[in-house]
Image: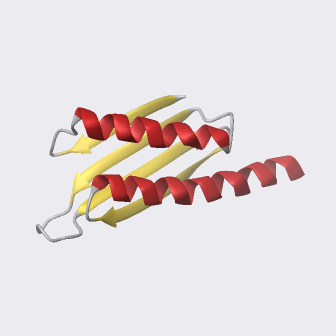
Amino acid sequence: MEVRIQSIHFDASEQLQSFIQKKTAKLEKYYDDIKKVEVSLKVVKPETAENKEAGVKVLVPNGELYANKICDTFEEAIDVCVEALEKQLVKYKEKQRNK
């Protein structure tokens, strides 16, 4: 599974990138045939407390799943996105099974 991390208007630290790799790798437990995971990170203006936006797109055969969240930290946003995607992958897998 390929993970692409795109940080818009800033450079994501090595620590943040490895955190994202680790979190997105867990998605494979829910669905085996994930082609690619695209993560986009951006800081929302103005500089408020909750200004870290993370969008995670999971590309699967015949479709894609997406979650987007704005939180205090990128780690928190990624956590919430991955949780949402876990639920989506379980639903997607059920639908595939019922076909």
Q: Is residue 54 visible?
A: yes
Expressed as whole percent of the image width and height from the top left, the position of residue 85 reads: 56, 54
With 3 as the anchor, is 54 left or right in this view?
Answer: left
With 26 as the anchor, is 91 left or right in this view?
Answer: right
Instruction: Give the residue drawn at x 31%, y 65%.
Output: 71
What is the quadrant of residue 84 in the picture?
bottom right
Expressed as whole percent of the image width and height from the top left, the position of residue 64 reads: 58, 47
| In the foreground, 22 or 48 | 22
Q: Residue furthest right?
A: 98
Expressed as whole percent of the image width and height from the top left, the position of residue 36 reads: 52, 34
Instruction: Give the residue drawn at x 21%, y 37%.
Output: 13
Q: Is residue 99 visible?
A: no
Q: Residue furthest top?
A: 2
Instruction: Give the residue drawn at x 48%, y 47%.
Output: 57
Expressed as whole percent of the image width and height from the top left, the position of residue 35 reads: 58, 32
With 86 as the anchor, is 76 left or right in this view?
Answer: left
In the figure, 56 relative to 45: above or below? above
What is the quadrant of residue 53 in the picture?
bottom left
Number of marks in the rendered image: 0
What is the quadrant of residue 72 in the picture?
bottom left
Q: Split into 4 quadrants, where in the image is the N terminus?
A: top right
With 60 as the anchor, is 94 left or right in this view?
Answer: right
Instruction: Give the residue drawn at x 37%, y 40%.
Output: 19
In the figure, 31 relative to 67: above or below? above
Scheme of image coloration: secondary structure
